[in-house]
């Protein structure tokens, strides 16, 4: 049996996208605000008032800004795609969840 010659891995000095990390941070903050909003609403049995509405609106705005930064991060071609992909997928998910809850909140009145 002969041994196959294997090429060593080449690690390049490729940076990560700063906009991608910023979008991930905004999306995580948005989802945390959303969890706090839902917890407050459940605790108040649906009668939480305007404060939870403000939290929901802030979560929606953070999700939209995170998605915008994720889209902007795709312009940086010399960066890893991991943070770009995670930021974009989290952004789409967070915006969809926030919009659905926002519409259900308005329709429930």
Image (cartoon, helix red, strand yellow):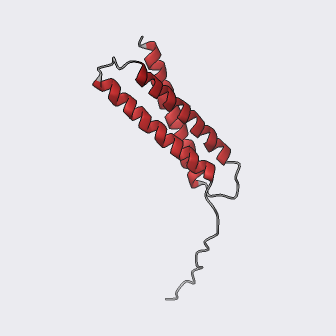
Instruction: State the residue at coordinates (44%, 19%).
Output: 104
Q: Is residue 86 visible?
A: yes
73 versus 11 height, above or below: above
State the quadrant of the C terminus.
top left
- Place of residue 25 in the rendered image (x, y in percent of width and height, measured from the top left): 52, 45
Give whichever of 12, 50 is nearer the camera. 50
Q: Quadrant of residue 9?
A: bottom right
How many numbered marks does the figure carry?
Answer: 0
90 versus 96 height, above or below: below
Instruction: State the residue at coordinates (53%, 32%).
Output: 95
Instruction: State the residue at coordinates (47%, 30%).
Output: 97
Identify the residue at the far top of this view.
Answer: 109
- Place of residue 103 in the rendered image (x, y in percent of width and height, measured from the top left): 48, 19
Instruction: State the residue at coordinates (52%, 88%).
Output: 2
38 versus 46 height, above or below: below
76 versus 48 height, above or below: below
Horizontally, residue 68 falls left or right of residue 54, namely: right
Identify the residue at the far front of this view.
Answer: 51
Q: Quadrant of residue 68?
A: top right
Give whichever of 60, 75 is nearer the camera. 60
Q: Is residue 96 visible?
A: no
Horizontally, residue 37 falls left or right of residue 58, namely: left
- Place of residue 101 in the rendered image (x, y in percent of width and height, measured from the top left): 45, 24
Identify the residue at the far bottom of this view.
Answer: 1
- Place of residue 14 in the rendered image (x, y in percent of width and height, measured from the top left): 64, 64
């Amino acid at each position: 049996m002969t041994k196959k010659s294997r090429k060593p891995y080449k690690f390049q000095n490729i940076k990560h996208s700063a906009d991608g990390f910023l979008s991930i941070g905004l999306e995580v903050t948005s989802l945390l605000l959303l969890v706090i909003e839902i917890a407050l609403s459940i605790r108040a049995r649906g009668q939480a008032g305007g404060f939870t509405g403000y939290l929901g609106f802030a979560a929606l705005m953070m999700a939209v800004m995170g998605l915008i930064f994720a889209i902007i991060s795709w312009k940086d071609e010399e960066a890893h795609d991991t943070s770009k992909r995670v930021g974009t997928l989290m952004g789409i998910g967070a915006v969809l969840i926030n919009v659905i809850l926002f519409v259900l909140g308005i329709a429930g009145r």
